[in-house]
Image (cartoon, rainbow, N blue to C red):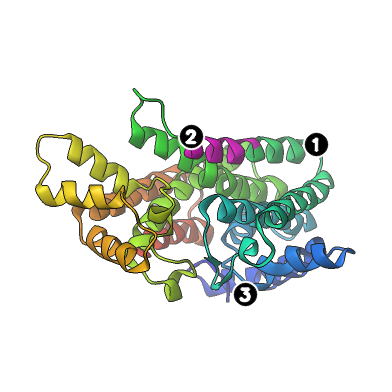
Amino acid sequence: MTSLPLGSAALEEALTPRLALVEERLRDAVAQSDRLAHATSRHLVDAGGKRLRPMLTLLTAQLGDGARPEVVEAGVVVELTHLATLYHDDVMDSAPTRRGAPAAHEVWGNSVAILTGDLLFARASRVVAGLGPEAVRIQAQTFERLCLGQLHETVGPDEDADAVAHYLQVLADKTGSLIATSARFGAMFAGCMPSVVQQVTEYGEYAGVAFQLADDVIDVRSDAETTGKTPGTDLREAVPTMPVLLLRQRVAGPDATDDDRRLLADIDGDLSADEVLADVVARLSRHAVVDETAALAQAWARRAKDAVAGLPEGEVRDALMTFADALVARAA
């Protein structure tokens, strides 16, 4: 079974063995001759994951010649890049778990985790070099946006900037850019027309923002067993999320309630104790700002669907529509 809800048995049959090839190549790509580097590089690969990005590459390639070997290599590139960002993100966010396993920095320390992420970026660069200069350029642009997104998330918006607009740009850079590249590579290496490549690229950008907004909802309304990540980690580390930004907007306005103000004060307070964090997460999860975040996720998913509405009718377009709906259904 594939990790995307494709809605088509024929697509499942076509893509499942291709995804198995990506998985095989991914394990080859992270293999290191150095014992420690090998163990750290395999850590998140072995922990599993949905492989959404390479699956999207394989799916959009079905709009052209999806059997080309370059498509599989492109799928490896985007997943290696994604894995590299996870090592870095978990250090930045002090996340204790990832995919139900201890985060790499919890096992080997921050420095080793960061260097492992760098190693995986290097491996992704080696693989993409075999796909030609245009692929290298796209990968470099994507890497730049990933870094800028993390930088802007870390430093926050300027004092007079719109914090919500700033956050949406962070999501576009940190998440949308790589999902867009995943979709772009599939169509590009399958020989699709430039107009088709452009449509799926826009789809990936919008779907990526929808995906992350849905994650903001899931972070406060799901448990660690479901997500593989400790609920409220972002709150504890003061990492901005859309529900908190919307709550800040509300508290700054004339219609804020005492409950709104108390909740925000507690979010900005000491969340180091597990019971305090759990109480704040529970109160936030019941607040209207989380419903507003879910509605925003749905709006971005609709933008993604609109971007590919002009593709030829068929099972690939239908699968892209289904996938966009599934991204936000997780947060329902």
The kind of secondary structure element at disc 3 is helix
| Type of amino acid at the residue the image marks with label 3 | Glu
279 vs 151, nearest the viewer = 279
Residue numbers of the magenta segment: 144-154
Distance in Å between CA atoms under marks 2 and 1: 33 Å
Q: Residue 151: horizontal and vertical position, in percent?
A: 55, 36
120 vs 104, nearest the viewer = 104
Which comes before the other along the chain, label 2 or label 1? 1
On screen, residue 111 above or below 154: below
Label 1: few (<14), some (14–19) or many (≥20) C-alpha neighbours in 10 Å: few
User: Are the residues tagged 3 and 1 within 8 Å (C-beta)?
Assistant: no
On screen, residue 317 above or below 311: below
Q: Residue at x 69, y 73 (%)?
A: 17
From the image, which quarter does the N terminus lie in? bottom right
| Type of amino acid at the residue the image marks with label 1 | Pro
The kind of secondary structure element at disc 1 is helix
Callout in the foreground (2, 3)? 2
In the drawing, what numbered circle is on residue 303? none
Q: Residue 24: horizontal and vertical position, in percent?
A: 77, 70
- The residue identified by callout 2 is 155
Which comes before the other along the chain, label 3 or label 1? 3
- The residue identified by callout 3 is 13
Which picture quadrant has residue 290? bottom left
Report how many numbered discs are placed on residues in the image.
3
Callout in the foreground (2, 1)? 2
- The residue identified by callout 1 is 133
The magenta stretch spans residue 155: no
